[in-house]
Amino acid sequence: MSDTILLLGAGGHARSCIDVIEQEGRFRIAGLVGSADEIGTEQLGYPVLGCDADLPRLLNEYRRVLVTVGQVKSPEVRMRLYAMAREHGCELPVIVSPHAYVSRHATLGAGTVVIHGVIVNPNARVGENCTLNTGAIVDHDAVVGDHCHISTTAVLNGGVHVGAGTFVGSNACVRQDIRIGARCVIGMGQAVVADCADGAWLPVPRERT
C-alpha cells in the first residue's frame, strides 16, 4: 500500500479532489472516510471505508492521507482531521493538478490541494491543509495561511496576506497588498480593497447559522 492514499471526507469537495489525484497519477485512492450512513457507498467508484469512529484504525492502516472535507463558514472540521492525521504520523502530500500552474519559486504546505486551472505565481507562499479551488489565482508574493480555502476563480493579487483558516469565496478579488485576518469569510464576488480584521465577514451576514 505504499502508493495508496486515504481521503478524509466523502462529499462534493472530495469528488473534485479525486479527479485531481487521478489526473496527477501519483497515488492510488484506497477509499474515503465519511459519515456513518455513507459507509458501504461509493464516490466516483471508490468505497467509503468508515466514519470518524473508525479514524484511529484507518490512520494506522493508511499512512498517507488528504483532507477532502469542504470549507465555507468554518475551518474547524478540516483542522481537526488534519491534526489527527499529524498525531498519527501520517504523510499529507501536496496534490497539484497537471492542469494548474505553480511557479517553481512558489511554496505549498503539506496537505494542500491545487485544483484544475489554478495559477500560483513566483514567491507566493501557501500554507498547510489549504484548498486552491478551480481557476483561483495567487499572484506574486502573496501569502496564504494554513487551513484556508481560496475558492473558484478568486483572485489574490500581489503581496496579499490571508490569515489562517480564512475562506475567500468564488470570484472574489483582493487588491494588492491587502491583509486579511485569520478566520475571515470573504463572500462570493466581493471586491476587497481594505484590510480585514481577524474574524471579519464580508458582507456581514444578517444571521450566522
Image: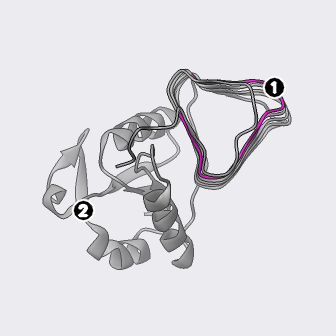
Q: Quadrant of residue 143?
A: top right
Sequence-earlier tag: 2 or 1: 2
Residue 11: x, y in percent?
30, 45
Q: Is residue 158 left or right of residue 170?
A: right
Residue 154: x, y in percent?
59, 25
Hey, what amino acid is under mark 2? Answer: Leu
How far apart are the alpha carbons under marks 2 and 1? 44 Å
Verify whether residue 175 appears in magenta: yes
Residue 124: x, y in percent?
80, 37
Location of mark 1 (residue): 176
Verify whether residue 126 appears in magenta: no
Q: In which quarter of the image is residue 120?
A: top right
**Residue neighbourhood size for the residue with mark 2, other residues' Cα within 10 Å, grouped as few (<14), some (14–19), many (≥20):** many
Hey, what amino acid is under mark 1? Answer: Gln
Location of mark 2 (residue): 49
| Region in magenta | 172-186
User: Between residues 85 and 200, which one lies in front from this camera angle?
Assistant: 200
Seen in the picture, residue 123 relative to 53 is either above or below; the reply is: above
Secondary structure at badge 2 equals: strand
